[in-house]
Amino acid sequence: MTIDAPPRRDFAPGRYGILAGFALGVVLLVLAPMVAPPSNYLIPNHWKVTLTLAALASLAGVFALGRGAVRWALALSLGVMCAFAIRIAIDTSHDRTTHNLLPFELVGDFIGTLLWSIGGAALGFFARRFADRAEESETWTPRWKRPGR
C-alpha cells in the first residue's frame, strides 16, 4: 500500500518575483535618485520608469517560468513597495513633512505597480502560450532537402 504525497505548491514565481521587484525598486527608487539627484530630491519621475520596467520584468519572468503570472505580479509589486519603504525613510530623514499622505501613497503606488505588473505578466503568459504550441512546431527541414532522407 502506497500513500500518495499531497501535491507540492510551487512558490518559485513568488520568490523570484519578490527578488526581481526588490532589485528593481532599489535600483530605480533608491539608488538612481542618489546618483543623479534632480533639483528636487523626491522621485516623481522615477515611478514612470519603475512602472514600465515592472511590466517588462513581469513579461520576461512569466515568459521564462511559464507559470504563476498573478503570483509573480503580486510578488514583484510587493518587492517594489519594500524598496519604496527604504526611499520613504531617506525622504523623511531630509524633511519630516514629505510623506504626510503616506497610506494613500502606498496604496496608490502598490495598485499602479500591480496593474502594470499584471499587464506585463499577461503578455508574458500569452507569449509563452503562443511560443509553446506543440501542434504547430515540428522538426525543421530545409526546403532543398526532402523529408525522410
Image: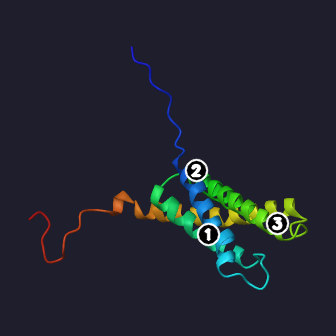
Please tell me whether mark 2 or mark 3 is closer to you in this view. 3
Q: Which mark is residue 93?
A: 3
Please tell me whether mark 3 or mark 1 is closer to you in this view. 3
Structural crowding at the residue carrying mark 2, measured as other residues with C-alpha within 10 Å and reported as few (<14), some (14–19) or many (≥20) = many
Residue displayed at 86% across by 59% down: 103
Quadrant in the picture for the N terminus: top left
- Disc with the residue nearer the chain's start (2 vs 3): 2
- Disc with the residue nearer the chain's start (1 vs 2): 2
Q: State the residue in front, 32 or 8.
A: 32
Residue displayed at 67% across by 59% down: 77
Residue displayed at 56% across by 70% down: 56
The answer to whether residue 47 is left or right of residue 91 is: left
Please tell me whether mark 1 or mark 2 is closer to you in this view. 1
**Residue denoted by label 2:** 14
Say which quarter of the image contains residue 113. bottom right
Q: Position of residue 86 (x, y in %)?
A: 72, 61
Task: Give the amino acid type for the residue marked by disc 2 in the picture.
Answer: Gly
Say which quarter of the image contains residue 83. bottom right
Q: State the residue in front, 106 or 66.
A: 106
Q: Which mark is residue 27?
A: 1
Kindly report the distance in space between the C-alpha atoms of the residues bearing marks 1 and 2: 20 Å
